[in-house]
Image (spheres, rainbow, N blue to C red):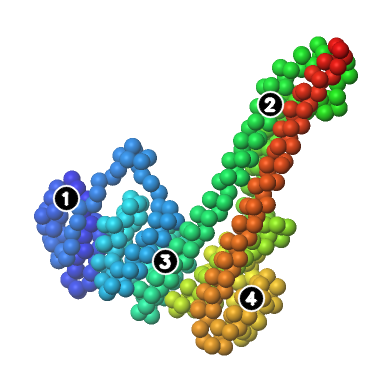
Amino acid sequence: MQTFAYVALDPAGRRKSGVTEASTADAAIAAISAEGRFVVEIKASKPEASAGEKVGRRRASKADLALFTRRMADLAAAGLPLDRVLQVVAEQSESSELRRVAEGALVEVRGGMPVSEALAQHPRLFPQVYTQTLRAGEASGQFAQVAERLAQFQETEVERKSKIVSAMIYPGVLTVTAVGVVVFLVTFVIPKLVVVFKDLGGDLPLSTKMLLLFTDFVSAKGLFLLGGIVAATVFYRAWVATETGASARDALLLHSPMLGPVMTKATVSRFARVLGTLIFGGVPILDALHLAGLSAGNRVIATAGDRVAGEVREGRAVAVAMRDTGVFPPVLTHMVAIGEETGDLPKMLSRVSDSLDFEVDNGLRRLTAVFEPMIVLVMGGIVGFVVLSVLLPIFQAQELIK
């Protein structure tokens, strides 16, 4: 028996989609026709993957989603019907997960469901801001233009993440290597040298005594120390899972000494870009402010977005409400004011987002330039202290022998 997905017309002429099991496609058509329905389209569903195949499947990444949206925008702009757009996108998708989702959405769309609603059935892949924007684009007849804005937004996010990962690779490798060397010395090398130090006799240098005390502590309390680190990590995760903890963490990130300004600009840029995309797509301003706040990835910004929405509901201008929160930078509030005056708010939001992105990129480069030598100096100092603490007793013993 096979499973077939179909689209059929009922006696009243309404399109209905569904699935049925039969040995062949002809048998499936006959069974559906016997129920008084006329089959418009039928397609054999792919068999359920085995456990080994499921392990080998690659989940859709942010880059896959960006490419999916870009292809959808380009095909829609070329004038293809939306069902054909989904069909072609499904055939071209390199991600098996996205391909299955697109094929399922294709069946739903050919059954009369809007594209946005079909994709909204997969919230893990397509968040509310994505489907709400597409829904507004479908309602306004600007699906291709809205999908284009969504594709640009996702491509910007993927590029930003790639830059951050690239910037962190060298400092990360350097830190892990240095920590590994220190742990190896303290755990394996120094304990074996303790006997040598005792045989040398005499009063050991202060640095050597400190090193030996630290080594003894790690050897005796290492498991307790590791357990404390694990417990602290579990407690932190439980704390940030609460609304209070998450809000405190997000506020701390925005106000931290060196990273804070970069985090603030990156978060506000994302808020502005999402808000501009939503407004361009035709989403009502109150809903757009709420969704943009949720998409910013920071509860301080999300709370500020909801506060702005509440004041706009009472008749205040968006720029004035943003300024009064004290959260959004002046560059955003001034550009929003210009956008409200000229009636082109999405364009102004896009410009301020581009400007903030440029500042974020420069900030990341400066932070990387500062952290790399700092890591080298700190780790080099630690390794140098360990080596010096090992060599000083030997030099001291040689002096005593002379």
Farthest bottom residue in view: 341
Of 223 and 239, nearer the camera is: 223
Residue 203 vertical placement versus 314 (above, below): above
Q: Does the image show residue 378?
A: yes
Of 24 and 398, nearer the camera is: 398
Residue 149: image location, x then y, percent: 43, 71
Q: Which residue is mark 4?
A: 331
Instruction: From the viewer's perspective, tell me whether residue 11 is left or right of residue 156.
Output: left
Of 255 and 179, nearer the camera is: 179
Q: Which residue is mark 1?
A: 22
Place residue 35 in its image quadrant.
Answer: bottom left
Place residue 211 in its image quadrant.
Answer: top right
Q: Mark 4 or mark 3: name the one nearer the start of the chain.
A: 3
Tag in front: 3 or 2: 2
State yes or no: discs 1 and 3 in contact (Cβ < 8 Å): no
Q: Which residue is mark 2?
A: 185
Q: Give the amino acid type for the residue marked by disc 2 in the picture.
A: Leu
Q: CA distance from mark 1 to mark 3?
A: 40 Å
